[in-house]
Image (cartoon, rainbow, N blue to C red):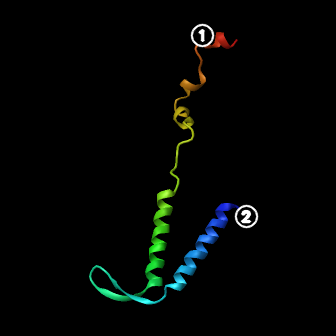
Amino acid sequence: MRAKTLFIIAFTALVTVFLVINTDAVEFNFIFTTAEVSKLVVIGVCTFIGFVLGYFVAKPRTTVTTYDDHFNADDSKKDHLSDEDRNYIS
């Protein structure tokens, strides 16, 4: 197995153990109200939101790898050589 795979498995196991240990209910203050919520739910939701945000931040952006499409529209620049260039190549 690769190191990245082992790290993901170990990290997932640690998060799971951490969530299972913290199952007691606590008073949680929302913006408009207060409620008794399990620590498991609060930590789990925060971890999930963190993973989703991390995925979107770290997602690779699409990059242009070639500019051939730009030149295909104007074939006169790409296919025709000047007389001087033809003499040099010959």
- The disc placed on residue 17 is none
Which quarter of the rendering shows the C terminus? top right
In what quadrant of the picture does the N terminus appear? bottom right
* Location of residue 29 with respect to 81 vertically, above or below: below
The residue positioned 58% from the left and 14% from the top of the image is 82
Q: How far apart in space, not on screen, are marks 2 and 1 (Cα)?
A: 59 Å
For marks 2 and 1, the one nearer the N-term is 2
Q: Residue visible at 51% across and 35% down?
A: 70
Residue at figure coordinates x 53%, y 42% from the top left: 64
Report the disc number at residue 84.
1
- Residue that numbered label 2 is attached to: 1
The relative height of residue 29 versus residue 85 in the rendered view (above or below) is below
Q: Residue at x 46, y 78 (%)?
A: 43
Instruction: Please tell me how crowded label 1 is: few (under 14), some (14-19), or many (20+) other residues with Cα within 10 Å.
Output: few
Give percent across and percent down for residue 20: 54, 85
**Residue placed most toward the observer, 16 or 52:** 16
Please, what is the three-letter code of the amino acid marked with disc 2?
Answer: Met
Residue 50, percent from left and from top: 46, 68
Say if 18 sits above or below 23 in the image.
Answer: above
Residue at the far right in the pictured view: 1
Residue 42 shown left or right of residue 7 in the figure: left
Tally of numbered discs: 2
Query: For this view, does 54 lie left or right of residue 68?
Result: left
Label 2 SS: loop
- Residue 46, given in percent of the width and then of the height, sits at 44, 74
